Image (cartoon, rainbow, N blue to C red):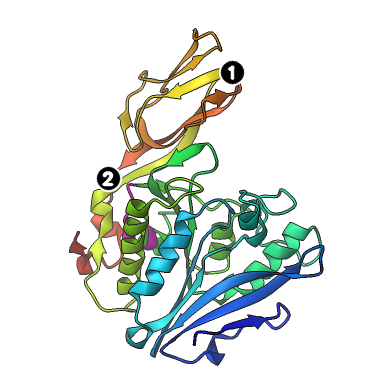
């Protein structure tokens, strides 16, 4: 079906009403702006010929995080609904007002990924989050939440997941990241809410904001396809992607103590040692005001690339306590084929 169907937010949508073995493009009204016009979220429903799980993939929950959009477009091209078991529900732009304004936040300058699941009565962002979760995300069996770094920073391709939970650990290990960080669910995040609702969910951070990076997009796509094979939605050998990933116990940001012009030295995914020089902070006359050192051994997950630096700015995102994955801790590990 090539036409776009608009569904009012009060009605929601029922996957049983979509024809099997077809791709459906749907626009869903959530809340209304000051013109009285609906904020419409675009949805692509790829409904398979046979029954199976509902896998949701969403992008641009932060409006300037765009790599996930291209990932979803390539995923549509890669999947034949006539050979699919189950349903893909794809949301290329989750935060419509933020995307239109080319900004991270919602129209009221609130971070949607800090207020999930929103409220049925409240601010404009809380209303939007409420309908987004209750009318769309609640329909999923599994969720892959696609993000990137925020403005002025760059990321490796990495996963945030609770790897002590069997289902989310499996989702993380099915992907194709450079780094996996053991990250317990944070209150207010979409991932945290979904997991609380029994919808296993992970966050996939795909590089940098406001651009398409097709090398990382293609690697992310490979992980999503691998996930679909694991759930037997499509045919093919499941690969153990974690063999090429660094797994960290946790991560944190290293901050500057001086303001000025910052130059961060390590590259993404570099391993740094405790005491290693990671950044210079200069004054406007070119004099070094601070040498920022790594306070622990770790791997570079992300870093600041904005030279303008206030005192207390984030400099480098460090993953620490590197973990050797235990094959016995991966459900279905024997079914994996080496990548």
> Where does the image place residue 151, in percent across and percent down from the top left?
55, 41
In the image shown, does 104 or 334 lie closer to the viewer? 104
Q: In the figure, is residue 101 to the left or right of 279?
A: right
Q: Residue 259: which numbered mark, if any?
A: 1
Question: Which residues make up the magenta segment?
Answer: 171-178
Q: In the figure, is residue 202 to the left or right of 216?
A: right
- Residue farthest along the left direction in this orientation: 338
In the image shown, does 164 or 309 lie closer to the viewer? 309
* Element on which disc 1 rests: loop
In the rendered view, would you say 72 is above or below 21?
A: above
> Where does the image place residue 65, in percent across and percent down from the top left?
52, 52
Crowding at dot 2, Cα within 10 Å, few <14 / some 14-19 / many 20+, comes out as: few
User: Residue, x 51% and y 25% (percent of image)?
Assistant: 307
Total marks in image: 2
> Which badge, 1 or 2, is on the more N-terminal residue?
1
Circle 2 is placed at which residue position? Answer: 324
User: Residue, x 45% and y 39% (percent of image)?
Assistant: 154
Q: In the figure, is residue 89 to the left or right of 320?
A: right
> Where does the image place residue 286, in percent across and percent down from the top left?
49, 10
Q: In the figure, is residue 326 to the left or right of 221?
A: left
User: Residue, x 66% and y 62% (percent of image)?
Assistant: 117
């Amino acid at each position: 079906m090539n036409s776009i169907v608009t569904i009012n937010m009060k009605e929601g949508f029922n996957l049983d009403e979509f024809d099997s073995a077809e791709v459906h493009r749907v626009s869903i009204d959530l809340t209304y702006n000051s013109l009285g016009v609906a904020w419409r979220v675009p949805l692509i429903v790829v409904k398979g010929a046979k029954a199976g799980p509902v896998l949701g993939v969403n992008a641009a929950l932060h409006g300037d995080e765009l790599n996930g959009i291209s990932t979803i477009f390539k995923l549509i091209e890669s999947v034949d609904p006539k050979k699919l078991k189950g349903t893909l529900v794809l949301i290329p732009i989750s935060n419509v007002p933020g995307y239109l304004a080319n900004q991270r936040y919602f129209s009221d300058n609130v971070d949607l990924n800090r207020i999930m699941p929103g409220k049925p009565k409240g601010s404009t962002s809380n209303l939007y989050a409420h309908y987004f979760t209750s009318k769309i995300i609640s329909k999923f069996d599994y969720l892959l939440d696609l993000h990137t770094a925020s403005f002025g920073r760059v990321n490796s391709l990495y996963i945030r997941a609770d790897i002590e939970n069997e289902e989310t650990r499996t989702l993380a290990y099915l992907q194709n990241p450079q780094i996996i960080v053991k990250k317990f669910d944070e209150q207010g995040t979409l991932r945290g809410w979904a997991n609380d609702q029994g919808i296993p969910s992970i966050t996939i951070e795909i590089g940098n904001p406001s651009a398409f990076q097709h090398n990382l997009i293609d690697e992310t796509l490979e992980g999503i396809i691998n996930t679909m094979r694991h759930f037997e939605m499509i045919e093919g050998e499941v690969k153990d992607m974690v063999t090429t990933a660094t797994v960290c116990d946790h991560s944190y940001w290293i901050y500057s103590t001086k303001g000025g012009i910052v130059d961060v030295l390590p590259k993404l995914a570099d391993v740094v040692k405790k005491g290693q020089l990671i950044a210079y902070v200069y004054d406007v006359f070119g004099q070094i005001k601070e040498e920022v050192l790594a306070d622990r051994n770790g791997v570079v997950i992300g870093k600041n690339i904005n030279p303008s630096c206030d005192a207390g700015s984030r400099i480098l995102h460090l993953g620490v306590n590197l973990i050797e994955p235990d094959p016995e801790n991966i459900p279905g590990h024997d079914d994996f084929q080496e990548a």
